[in-house]
Amino acid sequence: MTPLQQYLALAIALFFIGSWGVLARRNIILIVMCVELMLNAINIALVAFSNYSPTGAGRGEVFVFFVFALAAAEAAIGLAIAIAMYRLKERLSIGDFDEMKG
Amino acid sequence: MSHEVIAIMPELMLIATAVVILLVDPLLPVDGRRGLSWLGIFACITAALSTWFSRGEEFTAFSHGIALDKYSVFFKILLLAVAAMAMLISEKHLFLKKRLLGDYYALILFATIGMMVMAEAIDLITFFVGLELMALSSYLLAGFFRYQEKSIEAAMKYFLTGAFASNFILMGMALLYGLSGSTNYQEIGDAVKLGPVPEGPLVIAIMFILAGFAFKISAAPFHNWAPDVYQGSPTPAAAFLSVGPKVAAFAAILKFFTIMLGSQSDTWVPLMIALSIATMIVGATMALVQKDLKRMLGFSSIGHVGYLLLAVVATGDSGHTIGMAAVLFYLAAYAFMNMGAFGVLVYLANHNARFNDSLDDLAGLGRRRPWAAGVMTLFMLSLTGVPPTAGFLAKFYLFSAVVEAGFAWLALAGALFSLVSAYFYLRVIVFMYMRDSEQVEEKTDGKSWDLTLGLGIAAAGVLLLGILPAPVLNAAQDAVVKLLGN
């Protein structure tokens, strides 16, 4: 059986690739994709923990269902904001929406 | 009725009302929609009454998903009051901006349900659902004036930072689940305290959770989004967003860091102290240079988060109930005074089309609009912490709790920063009464009894908490005793 550590290493790696993407990307659709990547990393961690946990087996999988639901809702709202941005300025880069500062 | 139904009765009422509002809204002409806010307010009042009548109960429901106890009753009533005030101050503003849609009230109700679930949850999964319900509704509220560039910018910034922060909290919770094998707060607390839990991953989990929460409550250095979001959002929505999510997040933080991680205070107390000091510095200094009032209030709310974090530190070591009670009382005072301050800005924007939230627009207000200037003075004095207002007693209890927990130097730093903050609060009063302005108002018909009532409730709350604090203070103390007892 694959040891837990390997799953966790994958999850942590994906999580930080996702957060690097959120910080480095300028296009809102790519950022939403990176947020989803982070959520998938969390899902991997939850399922792995659930599979290896002696006492809490199953709860991780249940948790993952809720994360799925959230990911769908969050993508919907992220894309709604992207559409609103595009209608205003025909731009999707977050750099074009930087009026407020200071 | 079964226990389960009693426990979530207020939430069920709000859900039903929100769905009715969404269904009825498209059928109504614009003028008819003005009644929708009262439907929402009525739901908040009935939900608060139903919560009030269940205050004697102590039980858990949904297989230990939520706990109905005095702690959740306190927060639910406070959050419902915030939601009701937000709807009172919103109606006229939305009408004048031609965005009077039922969706707005439905979103406020959904966000309130999420906050209430956050406060009463005793299970990570339940908490997570509440957190996201609150967060997703808030992003939409920030972008509600979607034809204004500023509003969309606010929604975008709020969404990106909020989603990022949620992922950090979620990763921390996944690690906690992996370490303890449970998602129940109490079971995690026991496992962390007694069981053999590897030290390194636990510290990482705590840091993930703390960073995520710091984003959510806009603690420095994770605060950058907050002033932008409050400045860009519709003003009544900013009032709601600057109070509701913070109250709910502190309700959850207190539960997380006492029930679950109370035994790990050696790890998180130093981090929390650092966050708190950084937050107080940013809140006090950045607000000094702001010309935009909403932005200034944004930085001021960051400062208040710094003081609140001090009291969370005070709960740390041995679970001092007095520190927790101070947080609860401070949140109640903060809710009324911040809501009121934003409410006055809504009032001014409704009456004067040229008002664009800048400090200069307040010049000569004392003569032009004595009532508005009077209540604004009250809220500014309360935010400063001048007796006999709620802000004074809240700060007094908070700093004495911090001293009692053995962090006298932190309380001193807090008092120092609140002295600095007096400068920008009192400057508002100086502008209103001692500056003359040549500006001619462009009068609009902004008369609204709803808004007046909302401001009246906020002002009455500030004065009542300042003069007769006993009922709320006792409720706050009762609320936390049981929480730490088990």
Image (spheres, coloured by chain):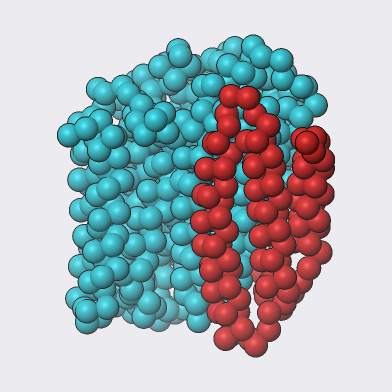
Q: B96 or A64: which is nearer to us?
A: A64
Chain B colour as displayed: cyan
Can residue B16 be seen here? The reply is yes
Assign the C terminus of chain B to one quadrant of the image: top left
Seen in the image, is B277 located left or right of residue B377?
Answer: right
Quadrant in the rendering for residue B98: bottom left
Q: Is residue B74 above or below residue B108?
A: above
| Residue B19 percent location from the top left of the image | 28, 62
- Residue B258, given in percent of the width and then of the height, sits at 56, 22
Residue displayed at 62% across by 32% down: B177
Which residue is at the front of the view, B166 or B90?
A: B166
Task: Name the residue: 66% across, 53% down.
Answer: A39
Q: Residue at x 54, y 62 (%)?
A: A72
When asked about the image quadrant of residue B67, the answer is top left
Q: Colour of chain A?
A: red
Q: Position of residue B274 (x, y in %)?
A: 74, 32
Up-down relation of residue B13 to residue B414 (above or below):
below
Determine if residue B224 is in view.
Answer: no
Above or below residue A34? Residue B8 is above
Q: Is residue B341 left or right of residue B264?
A: left
Q: Quadrant of the N terminus of chain B?
A: top left
Q: Is residue A97 left or right of residue B70?
A: right
Q: Position of residue B35 (x, y in %)?
A: 20, 67
Q: Residue at (68%, 32%) from the top-left corner?
A: A52
Outermost residue toward the left in this view:
B1
Q: Residue furthest front?
A: A1
